[in-house]
Image (cartoon, rainbow, N blue to C red):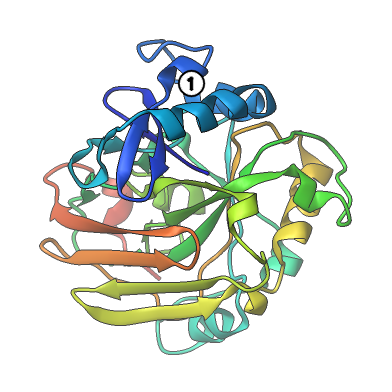
Amino acid sequence: MKLASFGGGRIGVVVDDRLIDATVASSVSADFWPPVGMVKLIADFDRARPQLEALAQSEAGTPLSTADLECPILWPNKVIAFPANYHAHVEEMKTGTGLISKFKADGQGFFLKSNSSLSGPREPIALPNIQGRQVHHECELAVIIGKGGRMISREDAMDHVFGYSCLLDIVVRGQEERVMRKSYDTFCPLGPYIVTRDEVPRYDDIDLLLEVNGVVRQKANTRDLIVDIPDMIRMASSVMMLYPGDIIASGTPAGVGPLKGGDKVKIVISHVGSMTLDVVQSESGGHELWNKPAA
């Protein structure tokens, strides 16, 4: 099943190229603040699924291409991100890009990315007005937690996965705190919808691809992850409680590169979906902290 958010907090089921309004299946109204309707639906999915399936079969819906899609999960408890999680990207960070990586994900662990950086599949990525700094794209798989828990074993980890989505981790390059460099508004596009786990044949064989202006920059498969999905869940849950709707960003493969205003970024993940985003240059976001050299 594919679940989308649209129209100011409404929830929809995607069937082929149609979007069926299924907000009625959620126990949270579309205008509720904070916007936790999708999180609540994920937590109650076993109860809601029969009604969602019935709506998908009985309603005509509207064309997906014209729907005002929003970020599928606007208010998760947290966004957990794994750095340097592909061997080729680790090598890339050591040479050629001027980036520095002291540890791989299996030795460094994870970090948190601001929830407010989340944006939808049809919102532009807004580059902050920072002189002398590059802003890079990072193509990642989003793993959506369905069943929460602490101290989750590797063997049980996949039972806690609700589904997947496409995610871009946008970052200002430099040596400042990672969370600040990665938490500008629109620096975490997610979408175009959530695909439930049962629709993805294998978690360890998912292709990822990213293009900028039609040119392929990143291409990888989840089989190449250093810390794979079960171990991401095991590691994260050893530290903190995982909740329904939490988002885990897988880490990015090699090929990260700069973005500029006017670019178009396309991410494609097999069995999960694709989204194309405009890049715009903002006039805001400057601060004297960024005035020193990136390195």
Q: Indicate the quadrant where residue 276 lies.
A: bottom left
Q: Residue 189, how many percent across, how many down?
A: 36, 49
User: Who's the residue at 29% across and 66% down the image?
Assistant: 266
Is residue 258 in sight in this rendering? yes
Residue 148 or 187: which is nearer the viewer?
Answer: 148
Q: How many labels does the image show?
A: 1
Is residue 74 in sight in this rendering? no
Q: Is residue 214 above or below residue 119?
A: below
Q: Is residue 95 above or below residue 116?
A: below
Q: Residue 209, how many percent across, how many down?
A: 41, 74
The single residue placed furthest to the front in the displayed view is: 58
Residue 129 or 22: which is nearer the viewer?
Answer: 22
Is 55 positioned to the left or the right of 42 in the image? left
Residue 228 or 42: which is nearer the viewer?
Answer: 42
Element under label 1?
Answer: helix
Q: Residues within 10 Å of mark 1 (few under 14, many from 20)?
A: many
Residue 50 or 173: which is nearer the viewer?
Answer: 50
Q: In this view, does 93 lie above or below 141?
A: below
User: Who's the residue at 44% across and 56% down the image?
Assistant: 166
Residue type for callout 1: Gly
User: Who's the residue at 48% across and 89% down the image?
Assistant: 95
Q: Residue 295, how many percent across, how many down?
A: 40, 71
Is 53 positioned to the left or the right of 138 in the image? right
Is 57 positioned to the left or the right of 109 in the image? left
Location of mark 1 (residue): 37
User: Who's the residue at 34% across and 44% down the image?
Assistant: 184
Q: Residue 114, how many percent across, how many down?
A: 47, 39
